[in-house]
């Protein structure tokens, strides 16, 4: 692509993170390669910018999605004795799963879910990309959900 530097700069300005810009540029290349015919495109650079713009919009939409909340999470402090025992068992299960997590994933998860920090704040304070923070949160949630599923199945 003759104008790849211009498109890379566009991505870099639009998303801020070099790693995200590189990922989006690769997606753009894949989309361009999948296009059946480029003979009908009068201005390839304008077409590239249009595709890039759509990728950036999709990227920002994806970044603004919040992680799912845990199913079966106790919602009330007013618990019956039976529910209190169940709550204590779940709490021990959560603690056990948290101790099994890699230290960085546990730190990211606690900052996000318990302290309510934004992904951007966490990424800046830990020197990670926002995408990496998002993946740590998602994987931590998956570990907890798997543990809950096993617990309920017993």
Image (spheres, rainbow, N blue to C red):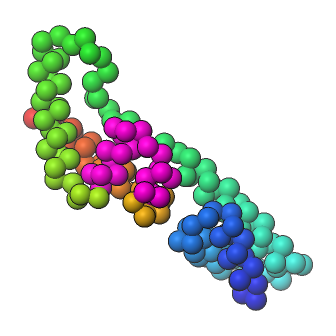
Identify the residue shown where x is 39% and y is 44%.
112
- Relative vertical location of residue 8 with respect to residue 16 in this rendering, above or below: below
List x then y, in percent, for residue 139: 32, 53
Q: Quadrant of the C terminus?
A: top left
Residue, far front:
125
Q: Quadrant of the N terminus?
A: bottom right
Is residue 31 visible in the rendered structure shown here? Answer: no
- Relative vertical location of residue 127 with respect to residue 78 in this rendering, above or below: below
Identify the residue shown where x is 28% and y is 29%.
72
Residue 21 image-quadrant placement: bottom right
Identify the residue shown where x is 21% and y is 13%.
79
Identify the residue shown where x is 63% and y is 62%.
15
Residue 133 appears left or right of 78 = right
Residue 20 appears left or right of 55 = left
Is residue 59 visible in the rendered structure shown here? Answer: yes
List x then y, in percent, for residue 151: 14, 36
List x then y, in percent, for residue 58: 63, 56
Q: Nearer the viewer, residue 137 or 30?
A: 137
Question: Does the stretch in magenta take in 114?
Answer: yes
Q: Nearer the viewer, residue 86 or 32?
A: 86
Residue, far right:
42
**Tally of numbered tags:** 0
List x then y, in percent, for residue 73: 29, 29
Question: Does the stretch in magenta take in 39?
Answer: no
| Magenta part of the chain | 105-125
Residue 101 appears left or right of 12 = left
Q: Main secondary structure of the magenta part?
A: helix
Residue, far bottom:
2
Residue 4 appears left or right of 90 = right
Residue 20 image-quadrant placement: bottom right
């Amino acid at each position: 692509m003759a104008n790849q530097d211009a498109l890379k700069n566009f991505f870099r300005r639009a998303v801020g993170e070099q790693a995200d810009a590189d990922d989006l540029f690769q997606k753009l290349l894949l989309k361009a390669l999948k296009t059946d015919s480029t003979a009908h495109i009068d201005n390839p650079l304008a077409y590239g910018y249009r595709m890039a713009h759509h990728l950036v919009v999709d990227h920002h939409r994806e970044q603004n999605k919040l992680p799912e909340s845990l199913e079966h999470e106790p919602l009330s402090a007013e618990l019956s004795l039976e529910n209190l025992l169940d709550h204590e068992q779940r709490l021990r299960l959560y603690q056990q799963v948290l101790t099994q997590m890699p230290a960085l994933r546990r730190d990211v998860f606690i900052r996000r879910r318990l302290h309510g920090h934004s992904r951007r704040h966490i990424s800046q304070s830990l020197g990670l990309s926002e995408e990496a923070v998002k993946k740590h949160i998602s994987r931590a949630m998956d570990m907890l959900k798997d543990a809950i599923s096993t617990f309920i199945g017993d």
